Image (cartoon, rainbow, N blue to C red):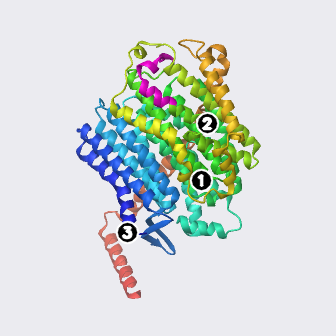
């Protein structure tokens, strides 16, 4: 790797660590200074990442060995390929504007110093995953991402729901990470290396790929990217501040799993890919419909994120990781805008999050409304907007490759997206105000509206026109003409599905949810359907497992611990046996007779002399 590029990567990785250290150690009580330090660092990172994106080319590597165990080398290094450069730019660029939004959103928060220190340490962690050249380094930064996410979700740790949500996110991700570290160990056992380049060579030379390796590595992806069945933490994580939801759970952290799967796609056996494709498509459809039964604006967007993560996972399972990364980039722009727009609405409505208590905000908050609607249309994959270039490309790839069932699930997901998007626009921005907070809503300050304009009116709209330049060169050869159909021809099956979904779903939802004021129309018309979509079935299953299986197993193990370890080993073997031996030796050796003591001294001296002479 050229020295100037190496220096650039060093700065990109370690600048946020320095900002985090300064904020945590010296600026905890100077919240304003910590906010601008972290924000300035984020914009510098965005500039450096853009420089790397435009100046570097090809696959660049750098590695330093830290330890060696026989033939196994462990070290720290960088692998900067086209995917890494894209991810660096997307993460740093979106994060910079989210930092600026946070300056206004967290202005009254007394713990701003801790908050912005957490944002910076999170940036260090996610960038480490992006540039890592081996599985061990990836896993270390992977765990740092989990830790920093836990801290940010628990920012309002004095509130029970935030503390519970942070613990849930941490534990669920650890379940996935257990499989992840076992997959790393299996890679080391089978291939003798953890380096991505070397692993790719081994995989290319192998006739078949072990299913176990891909399945175990996939566990980390299931947890971090909230894929079925480890998706239950994402909606609860909305307990953190809204900028955290935008940064971690819309644009970066959940995308880390998608990026990692693209990084190790050469290790995934066909059976693993099939599972990822089917489960991703199914979750995309289910999560989209579940969003229709949420009244909290952030939780509705969280289900939207689950749906799009399922679409990205489906693209990986279909064998098109580059499409997944392209959708990751487009999704980062419009979903970050939606979360920041939700934050602006919450701020303007005096911290009200219930959409049924909003309404009429188009007149009160026109700039927020315009950016939110633009990002929503991109989310719905309106032709020539950012979401269309990536989302419809994945749907078209499923159709082109002959996966009709997956195409059907993705089509349902497209319909669900338009339904919950139209519902959200109708409940939040149209009609009349449904509460005192909504009637007195006000537009947000410039630190909050400027990021909305840049991410919403610019990149959520125009980002799609740059899609063909964002895709890594030559990575889409197997589906070039399928992508050409969806990108430039409105007669592609995916585009037809999208347009029908837009007409039926989006505009139908605008009319349907305007029929009832101050209540959810679906809940009024069909309470049973609303309950089915609202009920969290997987949470109930996990609760049953913990209460009925895991707790009883742990109680039985605790009983064995008390009976065998504490009762037998400690009290009998550890305490009783030495006591008996002490009593017997005391009775034998300590009898108060000088002749016996002299005899033992002589016998001991003779034994010691024999031992020394024998040697």
Relative to 433, say whether 125 is above or below.
below
Question: Is residue 277 part of the magenta span, yes or no?
Answer: no
**Residue of label 1:** 322
Q: What element carries label 3?
A: helix
| Left or right for 65, reference 179 | left
Q: Residue at x 66, y 33 (%)?
A: 499
In the rendering, which numbered label is found on residue 3? Answer: 3
Comes first in the chain, label 2 or label 1: 1
Residue to which mark 2 is pinned? 545
Task: Name the quarter where the N terminus is drawn.
Answer: bottom left
Q: Using the image as rendered, state which of residue 281 and residue 567 is in the foreground.
A: 281
Q: Which residue occupies 42% across, 33% down?
A: 242
Counting residues from the start of the chain, the first of labels 3 and 1 encountered is 3
Q: Position of residue 37 (x, y in %)?
A: 28, 45
Q: Earlier in the sequence, mark 2 or mark 3?
A: 3
| Near-viewer residue (11 or 48) | 48
Q: Depth-wise, is mark 2 or mark 1 nearer the camera?
A: 1
Graded by Cα atoms within 10 Å as few (under 14), some (14 to 19) or many (20 or more), the crowding at tag 3 reads few
Query: Is mark 3 in CB contact (under 8 Å) with mark 1?
Result: no
* Label 1 neighbour load within 10 Å: few <14, some 14-19, many 20+: many
- Position of the C terminus, as image quadrant, is bottom left
Magenta region, residue range? 356-373
User: Which SS class for mark 2?
Assistant: helix
Could you tell whether 138 is left or right of 309 in the image? left
CA distance for labels 3 and 1: 28 Å
């Amino acid at each position: 790797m050229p020295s100037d590029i190496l220096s650039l990567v060093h700065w990109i990785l370690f600048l946020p660590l320095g900002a985090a250290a300064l904020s945590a150690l010296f600026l905890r009580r100077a919240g304003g200074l910590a906010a601008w330090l972290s924000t300035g660092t984020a914009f510098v990172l965005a500039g450096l990442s853009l420089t790397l994106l435009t100046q570097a080319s090809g696959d660049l590597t750098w590695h330093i060995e830290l330890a060696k165990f026989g033939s196994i080398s462990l070290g720290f290094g960088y692998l900067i390929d086209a995917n890494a450069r894209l991810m660096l730019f997307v993460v740093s660029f979106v994060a910079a504007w989210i930092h600026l939004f946070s300056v206004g959103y967290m202005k009254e928060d007394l713990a701003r110093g801790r908050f912005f220190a957490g944002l910076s340490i999170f940036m260090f962690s996610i960038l480490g995953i992006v540039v890592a050249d081996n599985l061990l380094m990836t896993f270390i930064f992977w765990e740092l991402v989990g830790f920093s996410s836990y801290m940010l979700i628990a920012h309002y740790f004095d509130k029970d729901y935030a503390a519970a949500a942070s613990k849930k996110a941490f534990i669920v991700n650890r379940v996935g990470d257990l499989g992840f570290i076992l997959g790393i160990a299996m890679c080391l056992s089978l291939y003798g290396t953890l380096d991505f380049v070397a692993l790719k060579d081994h995989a290319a030379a192998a006739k078949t790929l072990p299913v176990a390796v891909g399945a175990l590595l996939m566990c980390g992806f299931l947890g971090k990217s909230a894929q079925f069945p480890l998706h239950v933490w994402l909606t609860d994580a909305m307990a953190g501040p809204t900028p955290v939801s935008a940064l971690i759970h819309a644009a970066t952290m959940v995308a880390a799993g998608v990026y990692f799967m693209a990084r190790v796609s050469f290790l995934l056996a066909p059976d693993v890919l099939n599972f990822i494709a089917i489960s991703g498509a199914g979750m995309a459809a289910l999560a989209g419909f579940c969003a229709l039964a949420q009244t909290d604006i952030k939780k509705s967007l969280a289900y939207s994120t689950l749906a799009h993560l399922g679409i990205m996972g489906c693209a990986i399972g279909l064998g098109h990781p580059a499409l997944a990364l392209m959708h990751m980039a487009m999704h980062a722009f419009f979903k970050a805008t939606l979360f920041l727009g939700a934050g602006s609405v919450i701020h303007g409505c005096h911290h009200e999050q219930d959409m049924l208590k909003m309404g009429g905000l188009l007149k009160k908050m026109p700039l927020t409304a315009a950016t939110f609607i633009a990002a929503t249309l991109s989310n719905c994959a309106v032709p020539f907007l950012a979401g269309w270039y990536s989302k419809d490309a994945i749907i078209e790839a499923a159709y082109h490759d002959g996966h009709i069932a997956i195409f059907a699930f993705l089509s349902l997901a497209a319909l669900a997206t338009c339904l919950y998007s139209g519902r959200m626009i109708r409940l939040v921005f149209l009609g009349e105000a449904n509460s005192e907070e909504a009637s007195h809503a006000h537009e947000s300050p410039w630190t909050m509206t400027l990021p909305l304009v840049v991410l919403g009116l610019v990149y959520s709209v125009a980002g799609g026109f740059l899609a063909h330049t964002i895709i890594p060169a030559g990575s889409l050869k197997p589906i070039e003409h399928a992508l050409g159909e969806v990108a430039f021809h409105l007669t592609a099956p995916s585009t037809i599905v999208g347009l029908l979904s837009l007409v039926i779903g989006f505009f139908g939802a605008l009319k349907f949810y305007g029929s009832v004021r101050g209540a959810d129309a679906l809940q009024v018309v069909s309470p049973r359907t609303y309950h089915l979509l609202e009920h969290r079935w997987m949470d109930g299953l996990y609760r049953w497992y913990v209460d009925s299986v895991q707790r009883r197993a742990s109680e039985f193990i605790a009983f064995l611990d008390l009976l065998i370890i504490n009762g037998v080993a400690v009290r009998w073997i550890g305490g009783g046996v030495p006591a008996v031996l002490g009593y017997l030796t005391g009775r034998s050796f300590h009898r108060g007779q000088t002749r016996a003591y002299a005899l033992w001294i002589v016998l001991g001296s003779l034994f010691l002399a024999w031992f020394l002479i024998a040697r």
